[in-house]
Amino acid sequence: MQLRSAARTDIGKVRHHNEDRLLCDDRLRLYGVADGIGGLPGGADAAQLAVELVQVGIRDLGDLSQLADVVREINDAVATLGRRVSPHYGIGTTLTFGVFRDGCLDLAHVGDSRCYCLRDGRLACLTTDHSVENEARAKAAQGQPYWYNPSQRNALTRCIGQLADLEVDTLHRRLQDGDRYLFCSDGITKQIDETELASRLAAAAPDEIIRGLVDLASHRGGYDNATAVLVFVDKAE
């Protein structure tokens, strides 16, 4: 299989700094996004360190079944940096990335950035936001009471940089010719719904799709940094 990729990030119209970082490494076949947590100092530092360490970790990793261990090591490194640059609050970032190897995607995910797959015209979200609201729903489905303040429903329950033990979501799936994978920060998903995402991902050129998504998020207010990374899976000639 052959891959085509495109990536773009934009500060938006409200934030003073872009705390998003992206991964688009065709050599490692490594793609993803990190979104520094707003409201905490050092969000950009957390995101930058996370993507740098992902590249090092994947370059040296032979067995992708150990992907979660790589992410936990990154979490510890970001937490250590947080104790130095922000001892009272720490620092944090989301991290969602995939490695395309041997005809498969291995995905790791922490936070509320997302990975989507468009396959045979159908869009599927491969990640679950680690938010207070989603955790409440999961506990309710298990019959466990869980109260939360609705104003905090989007607050993260997991992030890179947390001091507690980190649970990492991972996914292994076989690629198919024609698959399209979108990694994006919530600056995209809060402005563009999944129906529109599916329609736009069906276009022909990765660069045009990415530019259109980021520009549309900005046009609709640009309330947050917006970052998107797109990977086309093409049939090898």
Image (cartoon, rainbow, N blue to C red):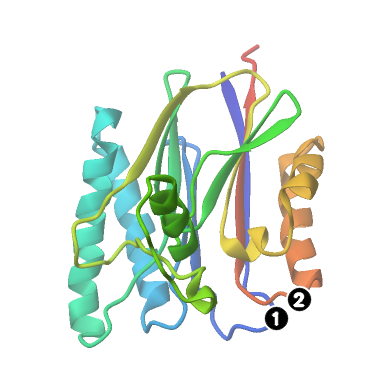
Q: Tag on residue 51?
A: none
Q: Is residue 90 above or below residue 157?
A: below
Res 198 → quadrant: top right
At 23% from the left and 88% from the top, the residue drawn is 88
Reading the chain from its start, which is encountered first: label 2 or label 1?
Answer: 1
Question: Circle 2 is placed at which residue position?
Answer: 221
Q: Quick check: marks 2 and 1 in contact, CB under 8 Å?
A: yes
Give me the residue at 24% from left, 38% from top.
Answer: 60
The answer to which image quadrant residue 111 occupies is bottom left
Q: Quadrant of the C terminus?
A: top right
Q: Residue furthest top?
A: 237
Can you see residue 208? Answer: no
Query: In the image, what residue type sits under mark 2?
Result: Gly
Q: Which residue is mark 1?
A: 13
Residue 128 position within the rendered picture, expressed as x and y whole percent measured from the top left: 49, 48
Q: Nearer the viewer, residue 92 or 145?
A: 145
Q: Secondary structure at mark 1?
A: loop
The residue shown at (39%, 66%) is 93
> Which amino acid type is marked by label 1?
Lys
Decide if residue 152 is on the left or right side of residue 235: left
Crowding at mark 2 (Cα within 10 Å: few <14, some 14-19, many 20+): few
Is 227 above or below relative to 64?
A: below
Q: Residue at x 76, y 28 (%)?
A: 121
For disc 1, the neighbor class at 10 Å (few under 14, some 14 to 19, many from 20) is some
Quarter holding residue 165: bottom left
